[in-house]
Amino acid sequence: MAITKHSPLFAPPSVTEKRFAKRLRDGKSPAADEAASIYRRMVNNGFDPLIALGQFQAESNLGTKGHAKDTLNWGNILFYEWTAELGAVDHAPGNGFHYSKFPSWTHGARAYIRLMKSYDRRGFDTVELGHGILAGGIIVFDREGMRRGRRRRAGGREHPNENPR
């Protein structure tokens, strides 16, 4: 199954566990050793792992670039009370943002799934609505949430990811 902007976030897996793990290994992802655990957690929660893989590629080149190398954060999720409940600690790299730093890639994926569930409950239930745009076959995360995050610190507005219960 091909992922399009109309693909639901929560759907049967459109990639096998074997291919999911192979993509992480081939991409030299530091999350590759946890591929089975991450894949099964996503599938058990009804989330399509291929969508998560696309975002992971776009956000951090499968965890090999950017802050994800240090944070083990599948989707560069900012730090919140709910992420701390999932084992995260605050990571402030000096760019004005505070990211969730997880003890493992599986913990980071768990937070990512929880965030995606909150999007789904609010009607952002497709790739286009939940992640932004599909560009050149790679899912690109909607940066609008980060811009709202900046306003929140300045103006006190609640960020849409602040309480994804």
Image (cartoon, grey):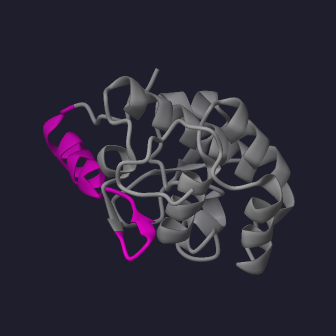
Image coordinates for residue 113, horizontal then vertical, percent: 57, 38
Please, which residue is most extreme toward the left here? Answer: 155
Toward which corner of the image does residue 164 lie, by quadrant? Answer: top left
**Quarter occupied by residue 84:** top right
What range of the chain is rendered magenta? 135-157
Q: Residue at x 21, y 46 (%)?
A: 148
Res. 103 in view: no
Q: Farthest residue in the top direction?
A: 165
Residue at point 30%, 34% (across, down): 160
Image coords of residue 141 (percent x, y): 38, 59
Q: Nearer the viewer, residue 92 or 161?
A: 161
Residue at 82 percent across and 45 percent down: it is 37
Q: Nearer the viewer, residue 92 or 52?
A: 52
**Could you say which is closer to the camera, residue 162 or residue 33?**
33
Residue 162 in view, yes or no? yes
Q: Is residue 103 left or right of residue 9?
A: right
- Specify whether residue 156 is painted magenta: yes
In this picture, is 84 found above or below 55? Answer: above
Q: Is residue 55 magenta?
A: no
Q: Classify 144 as above or below 111.
A: below
- Residue 64, percent across and down? 64, 75
In the rendered image, the quadrant that contains the N terminus is bottom right
Q: Looking at the image, is 143 positioned above or below residue 162?
A: below
Q: Where's residue 163, x and y in %?
A: 40, 25
Does residue 14 lie above or below 47 as drawn?
A: below
